Image: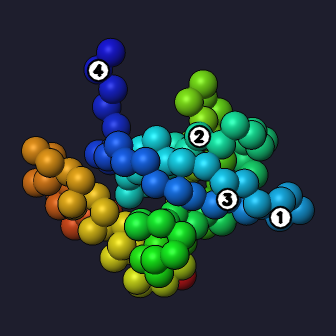
Amino acid sequence: MNERREFTRIVRPLEVDIVSAGDSELSGVTRDVSMKGLLVSTGVRRDNGTDVRCTVYLDGRDNPARIVALGNIVRQTAEGMAIAFRAVEGLESLEHLQQLLRLNAGADLEQVEREIAAHVGLMPR
Protein backbone atom coordinates (compact mmCIF):
# COMPACT_ATOMS: atom_id res chain seq x y z
CA MET A 1 0.00 0.00 0.00
CA ASN A 2 1.36 3.41 -0.95
CA GLU A 3 0.73 5.74 1.99
CA ARG A 4 1.08 9.48 1.47
CA ARG A 5 2.10 10.98 4.77
CA GLU A 6 2.83 14.59 5.62
CA PHE A 7 5.93 13.66 7.64
CA THR A 8 8.64 11.05 7.48
CA ARG A 9 8.39 8.52 10.28
CA ILE A 10 11.50 7.08 11.85
CA VAL A 11 11.42 3.72 13.55
CA ARG A 12 13.25 3.93 16.84
CA PRO A 13 12.21 2.21 20.07
CA LEU A 14 12.41 4.79 22.87
CA GLU A 15 10.94 4.73 26.35
CA VAL A 16 7.97 7.05 26.77
CA ASP A 17 5.68 8.08 29.62
CA ILE A 18 2.16 9.28 28.85
CA VAL A 19 0.04 11.20 31.34
CA SER A 20 -3.57 12.31 30.88
CA ALA A 21 -5.74 14.29 33.26
CA GLY A 22 -7.31 12.00 35.84
CA ASP A 23 -5.40 8.92 34.70
CA SER A 24 -2.30 7.35 36.08
CA GLU A 25 0.88 7.48 34.08
CA LEU A 26 1.39 4.91 31.33
CA SER A 27 4.77 3.71 30.17
CA GLY A 28 5.51 2.33 26.75
CA VAL A 29 7.91 2.16 23.85
CA THR A 30 7.70 4.19 20.65
CA ARG A 31 7.11 2.29 17.42
CA ASP A 32 7.73 5.36 15.26
CA VAL A 33 8.21 9.10 15.65
CA SER A 34 7.66 12.05 13.31
CA MET A 35 7.41 15.83 13.57
CA LYS A 36 3.66 15.35 13.89
CA GLY A 37 3.54 12.72 16.63
CA LEU A 38 4.29 9.14 17.56
CA LEU A 39 2.94 5.62 17.75
CA VAL A 40 3.49 4.02 21.13
CA SER A 41 3.01 0.45 22.36
CA THR A 42 1.70 0.46 25.93
CA GLY A 43 -0.50 -2.57 26.37
CA VAL A 44 -3.13 -0.15 27.73
CA ARG A 45 -5.63 1.88 25.75
CA ARG A 46 -7.11 5.30 26.33
CA ASP A 47 -10.01 6.93 24.49
CA ASN A 48 -9.40 8.73 21.21
CA GLY A 49 -9.41 12.47 21.77
CA THR A 50 -7.79 12.19 25.21
CA ASP A 51 -5.32 15.01 25.86
CA VAL A 52 -1.91 13.74 26.96
CA ARG A 53 1.55 14.87 27.94
CA CYS A 54 4.30 12.64 26.53
CA THR A 55 7.87 12.40 27.77
CA VAL A 56 10.15 10.58 25.33
CA TYR A 57 13.50 9.55 26.82
CA LEU A 58 16.20 9.77 24.16
CA ASP A 59 18.89 7.83 26.00
CA GLY A 60 17.15 6.19 28.94
CA ARG A 61 15.37 7.67 31.91
CA ASP A 62 18.57 8.65 33.71
CA ASN A 63 19.73 10.90 30.87
CA PRO A 64 18.32 14.46 30.81
CA ALA A 65 17.89 14.41 27.00
CA ARG A 66 14.16 14.08 26.41
CA ILE A 67 11.27 15.37 24.35
CA VAL A 68 8.22 16.61 26.23
CA ALA A 69 5.15 17.20 24.07
CA LEU A 70 1.46 17.91 24.49
CA GLY A 71 -0.95 16.15 22.20
CA ASN A 72 -3.98 13.95 21.95
CA ILE A 73 -4.71 10.34 21.12
CA VAL A 74 -5.98 10.20 17.56
CA ARG A 75 -6.09 6.49 16.77
CA GLN A 76 -5.77 3.01 18.23
CA THR A 77 -4.06 0.30 16.18
CA ALA A 78 -2.98 -3.26 16.84
CA GLU A 79 0.52 -1.83 17.39
CA GLY A 80 -0.52 0.83 19.90
CA MET A 81 -1.84 4.37 20.30
CA ALA A 82 -1.18 7.13 17.80
CA ILE A 83 -0.61 10.50 19.45
CA ALA A 84 -0.65 13.76 17.47
CA PHE A 85 1.50 16.54 18.89
CA ARG A 86 0.00 20.00 19.42
CA ALA A 87 3.06 21.59 21.00
CA VAL A 88 6.39 20.73 22.54
CA GLU A 89 7.44 22.00 25.95
CA GLY A 90 10.38 24.31 25.41
CA LEU A 91 12.82 24.98 22.61
CA GLU A 92 15.11 22.21 23.87
CA SER A 93 12.39 19.58 23.30
CA LEU A 94 11.79 20.88 19.77
CA GLU A 95 15.52 20.75 19.03
CA HIS A 96 15.77 17.21 20.43
CA LEU A 97 12.85 16.09 18.25
CA GLN A 98 14.40 17.61 15.14
CA GLN A 99 17.80 16.09 15.90
CA LEU A 100 16.28 12.67 16.58
CA LEU A 101 14.66 12.75 13.15
CA ARG A 102 17.83 13.96 11.43
CA LEU A 103 20.05 11.33 13.03
CA ASN A 104 17.68 8.48 12.14
CA ALA A 105 16.52 9.63 8.71
CA GLY A 106 19.12 7.71 6.73
CA ALA A 107 18.41 8.13 3.02
CA ASP A 108 15.42 10.37 3.86
CA LEU A 109 17.57 13.12 5.44
CA GLU A 110 16.88 15.68 2.70
CA GLN A 111 13.14 15.03 3.01
CA VAL A 112 13.30 15.39 6.82
CA GLU A 113 15.20 18.70 6.45
CA ARG A 114 12.48 19.99 4.10
CA GLU A 115 9.77 18.90 6.57
CA ILE A 116 11.50 20.66 9.46
CA ALA A 117 12.05 23.85 7.42
CA ALA A 118 8.49 23.96 6.10
CA HIS A 119 6.64 23.02 9.26
CA VAL A 120 5.91 25.96 11.49
CA GLY A 121 2.83 24.48 13.17
CA LEU A 122 4.64 22.61 15.94
CA MET A 123 6.02 25.27 18.23
CA PRO A 124 7.62 25.22 21.64
CA ARG A 125 5.28 26.22 24.42
**First-in-chain label (3 vs 2):** 3
The mark found on residue 21 in the picture is 1
Mark 3, Cα crowd under 10 Å, few <14 / some 14-19 / many 20+, is many
Q: Secondary structure at mark 3?
A: strand
The correct choice, above or below, for 80 with respect to 33 in the image is: above
Quadrant location of the C terminus? bottom right
Foreground tag (2 vs 4): 2
Q: Secondary structure at mark 4?
A: loop
Instruction: Count the numbered circles shown.
Output: 4
**First-in-chain label (3 vs 4):** 4
Residue at 38%, 57% (x, y): give it: 35
Mark 4, Cα crowd under 10 Å, few <14 / some 14-19 / many 20+, is few
Q: Position of residue 61 (x, y in %)?
A: 54, 70
Relative depth, front residue between 26 and 38:
26
Q: Position of residue 77 (x, y in %)?
A: 60, 28
Compute the Cα span from label 3 to label 4.
30 Å
Q: Position of residue 119 (x, y in %)?
A: 32, 63
The mark found on residue 41 in the picture is 2
**First-in-chain label (1 vs 2):** 1
Which amino acid, mark 4? Asn
Q: Secondary structure at mark 2?
A: strand
Compute the Cα span from label 2 to label 4.
24 Å
Q: Position of residue 78 (x, y in %)?
A: 60, 25
Compute the Cα span from label 1 to label 2.
20 Å
Residue at 14%, 48% (x, y): give it: 106
Residue denoted by label 3: 18
Compute the Cα span from label 3 to label 1.
10 Å
Compute the Cα span from label 3 to label 2.
11 Å
The mark found on residue 2 in the picture is 4
Compute the Cα span from label 1 to label 4.
37 Å
Q: Secondary structure at mark 1?
A: loop
